[in-house]
Amino acid sequence: MDTSLLATRLRRLAPGGPAPRVESALLLVTAAAVTAGVAARLTGSEHLADLLWALGTTSAVVPAVVWVLASLRRGHAGVDLIAVLALGGTLAVGEYLAGALIGLMLASGRTLEATAQRRASRDLRALLEHAPSSARRRTETGVRTVPLDEVVAEDLLVVGPGEVVPVDGIVESSAAVLDESVLTGEPLHVARARGEAVRSGVVNAGGAFDLRAGATARDSTYAGIVRLARQAGAESAPVVRLADRYAAWFLPVSLAVAGLAWLVSGSAVRAVAVLVVATPCPLLLAAPVAVVSGLSRASRLGVVVRDGGALENLGRARTLLLDKTGTLTRGRPRVLDVTASPGRTPAEVLRLAASADQYSPHVLARAIVEAARERGLELSVPVGVTEEPGRGATATVDGHRVVVGRAEGTRPPWAAAVDNRALLEGAAVAWLTVDGQPAGAVLLRDPLRLDAPRTVRSLRSAGIERVVMLTGDRSAPAREVGTLLGLDDVRSGLGPADKVASVRAERERAVTVMVGDGVNDAPALAAAHVGVAMGAHGSTASSETADVVLTTDRVSRLADAVFVAVRARRIAVQSALGGMLLSLAAMAAAAAGLLPPVAGAVLQEGIDVAVILNALRALRTDRTVRPALTSDAEALIHRFAAEHDDLQDVLAAVRDAADRLSGSPGPAALAAVQETHRLLTERLLPHEHAEEHRLYPALAPALGGPEATATMSRAHAEIDRLARRIATHLSLAHAHGGLAPEQLDDLRACLYGLSTVLRLHFAQEEESYFSLAP
């Protein structure tokens, strides 16, 4: 990759030079002139006040004329041209205060735009920082570091642990373990065997391996991503400000009325009076005030919007494109379920696997250890830990040789059920072997964010008509996520170029928003009308390419931002149109000679105050995704959400007991059912009862009354009923010395039914209630 050339282009794009200093200086001068003039007027020095205001007005005329001429050279005449005419008109009729205020408003708007442009130029810098600048080439005399531009096809390279793969190539070692999230967005590490292709930009997550270069850096995958981001950003048309769109017709109307008044009456004073009352404060200030108020309101919700143009586009958006991993899902795997071999329990399997994985950096290992600690399992200190990339960790735990990772050797009959479930759930499997014998399996999956379903519904109610998921993940798990969220379309197996193509196709139909969190999403974010980055844990590249950054790790903030953008844009339109209609009425009066310039200036100031006050309504809190909760309700939500994590082993025990009844309904199966009932009685049912009598009453006022939680209460009743039914079966078994054949079908149905109800109920509570708390 020619990084020096790209760096040069970035420096060329970076804002600099005198423009920002001119705007800042003008803002300072006009603000000082207005303030000093007001002070002079209050002390009775009217001539000094007029002089100061005239100086402020004059200081704004020259740069304003330069900006207008630059816009005209680009074939664009906007609100700044009306400002120049208004500045000249106020000087002509001696309305110096009005002129100074117009200059102050013009300087404020230009300074804000310059600040936004400085931020917008950083979109590719993070991509460059991630790109390697050298490679290690293996030669007959050893390994030598060479500049990346010297690498050619067929070179044998060495990629060390944690290093970025510099060029596309083929694995020459026995295996390579890679973190491909920079390209695909998927958090799971991928094992590549000898002879398999590897793309540049991915990170070596295992031991060092040899790579046979298949292309130069310039022709490799990562260079293509950088080019895509640059091209997509260049193709994005500059946003036409709301004020400029209205100025397109307000400007000629104002000039026509002024010219007609002069022509009919023969008095230049009437023409100046028309221009004075046509002073575009509703465009220069009222509409921007509403937009800036929206930006402020969004920032308080954890949403940083780059500029007013992005907020306006967000308020007009009708299509939403979403990455899956890290956006709709949490971006890191979590334990879905634990299966134990006959004679073992799921808790024992998870404890042994987590004990062996404590020192492993693998993403699945970290998830297993985290799950064990969440469930309060006491981990043992492993001895003799080794880890083979692509195969897993091996250690001695409590005197037993434990292996966690890929399954090897003869597979027991119960393993087939694990494979089937992993396929159906789209989950990864970490197998546990103890002393050479299969002991269990841990299923892991990247789960949906708790707030994702509510967010999608809220976005639709905010005006989003089409929601599409773009992901590099496989089709099966992607389709499952799309079905759960009710998305309009799901496109899976996409690379960065495919995502950009999808964004371009969608933006042909409507204003389009793209949401992502990885480096691989950066080109697609740049290609959309509005790019939104999950900035809390997302990549720097995606955050700096985006127009909007969510600073908290909650996708629901996006729905908040859309509501704020829609409302701010609506108020901006109201302010602009309302102010212009009042100005048009005043212009008609001035043209008829009923409104002299001085009275027109006073009237115009009244119009300005009215529309600005209206624009400030955008600062007020309005409808957002989440209802207002009391601090006590939020504390209860956090408490019960934590208890859900602690109760995952109970849910696993219910299913495990049902599975054991299906296999061999003997004493071991009965013992499993008894242990499950103990867990239900001592841990799960008290949790459900506390939710019913503490959490639900606390939430009811914010949700509109007790009817809002009625369906959840019905689920609690069903859980109680199934638990009592299981207790009845146990009583019968104790009376008859074991489980009778006629009990098995109903008891299995109770356990499987309870497992299903509990998982669905937990998911519903997490989506509907737990997602409400920040």
Image: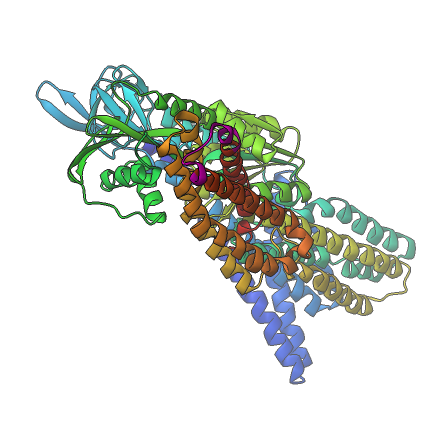
Residue 316 falls inside the magenta stretch:
no
Q: Position of residue 156 (x, y in %)?
A: 20, 19
Q: Residue at x 53, y 46 (%)?
A: 766
Residue 536 visible in the snapshot = no
- The vertical placement of 252 against 337, above or below, is below
Residue 209: image quadrant is top left
Q: Position of residue 563 (x, y in %)?
A: 64, 49
Q: Position of residue 725 (x, y in %)?
A: 53, 41
Dominant SS type (magenta): helix
- The answer to whether residue 113 is left or right of residue 400 is right
Q: Residue lying farthest front?
A: 736
Q: Residue at x 71, y 54 (%)?
A: 571
User: Residue 61 or 294: which is nearer the viewer?
Assistant: 294
Q: Residue at x 43, y 30 (%)?
A: 661
Residue 613 visible in the snapshot = yes
User: Residue 467 or 450: which is nearer the viewer?
Assistant: 450
Quadrant (top left/top right/bottom left/bottom right) for the N terminus? top left
User: Residue 115 or 612: which is nearer the viewer?
Assistant: 612
Residue 743 falls inside the magenta stretch:
yes
**How many numbered marks appear?**
0
- The vertical placement of 37 against 143, above or below, is below
User: Residue 596 or 35: which is nearer the viewer?
Assistant: 35
Tell me which segment is drawn in magenta.
Answer: 734-746
Q: How is the image coloured?
A: rainbow
Q: Residue lying farthest left?
A: 141
- The answer to whether residue 125 is left or right of residue 281 is left
Q: Residue at x 66, y 51 (%)?
A: 708
- The vertical placement of 57 against 465, above or below, is below
Q: Position of residue 533 (x, y in %)?
A: 49, 42
